[in-house]
Image: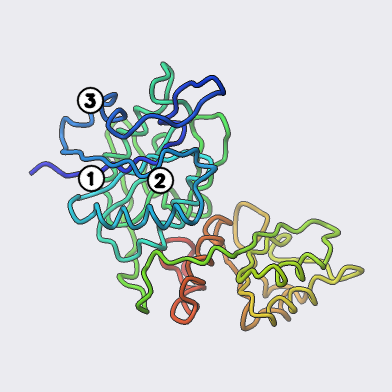
Amino acid sequence: MRPRIHLLATGGTIASLQSPDGLAPAMPAAEILRLSPRLHEDMDITARDVFTLDSSNIQPEEWQVLARAVREEAQHADGLVITHGTDTMAYTASALSFMLLGLEKPVVLTGSQLPLNHPLSDAPHNLAQAFQVAQQAPPGVYVAFHHKVIYGTRAVKMRTLGFDAFDSINAPAVGYFDADGLHLSPAPPMIPTVPGNTPPEQLDARVFLLKLMPGTDPSVFQYIVDAGYKGLVLEAFGLGGLHYIRRNLLDSLALVAASGVLTLVTTQCLYEKADFSVYEVGHNVLGTNVFGAHDMTSEAALTKLMWVLGDPEHRKPLLTQCLCHEMGCL
């Protein structure tokens, strides 16, 4: 029996056409498939247009719509491919990784740096590889791009122009393509279900991402509380440092935590982990509402915190657990 793969199109460069004002997403899913006839040779493909958006406009509300669409179409498919703009693909892939926990189908995001109808486009290869991953990978969310297969929670866009746009951060790529085809590493099991009765795609987008700089004004933390944010991802220095001489950010962070804002502390360093417990400067503020993000990417930390806040009563204990390859085993 031929595998059944469903394509969900969301726009992005891969679906863009030239307009008087520049490139704009306009190509529907049916046209993407028409221009990719070889995809149909060994699988049955169905398609659905979810959005036709530049990925800069794909936000938490769109993630929820997309997650529901994936669950609907997964009932009739063996795997799913999502075409998406590259600019926010890592955020969407990470968000879907949490929102689709327990889904027993592979979900593969891909896109391109040049439109599908461009003579030098990287889209044909990326599409072919994404559909192959959707046939062979175990359940989970992946990014397939330029011969690499990356867990959705480990992908980060590293290049604005290069075809090799995404890297797997703090974890090996889960697979790759060469002349022998697709090579996949064995995948550790994910948790099958999530506690609570809240819809799995439920999020709370009131999360602030703050990158510290020398001289950060402590009043920023008071603004976060006053503006009604429920979560904070703090990109600290190195392993988790922040200044407390002259401008005391330790007291400000304690204020945020005491106000009930759930905080994940990560590092501005792209590689390796944050560990807020190593130095005295951070050790004293770890507590009820302040947690280390370990080696999560900022995209994973942000989307995981949004997802946890969608049902904090049941999901908060999962904040520091590895659910879908977003952090190393602790």
| Mark 2 lies on residue | 143
Farthest residue, direction left? 1
| Mark 1 lies on residue | 135
Give the label on residue 307, or none. Answer: none
Q: Residue at x 63, y 64 (%)?
A: 233
Q: Are marks 3 and 2 in contact (CB under 8 Å)?
A: no
Amino acid type at image mark 2: Val
**Residue 74: x %, y % from top left:** 24, 54
Going from N to C along the chain, the mark reached first, 3 or 2, is 3
Q: Is residue 83 visible?
A: yes
Q: Quadrant of the N terminus?
A: top left
Q: Dot 3: within a 10 Å radius of its alpha carbon, few (fewer than 14), some, or many (20 or more) residues? A: few
Going from N to C along the chain, the mark reached first, 1 or 2, is 1
Mark 3 or 2, closer to the camera: 3
| Mark 3 lies on residue | 37
Amino acid type at image mark 3: Pro
Q: Give 30 or 195, whichever is nearer the viewer.
A: 30
Going from N to C along the chain, the mark reached first, 1 or 3, is 3
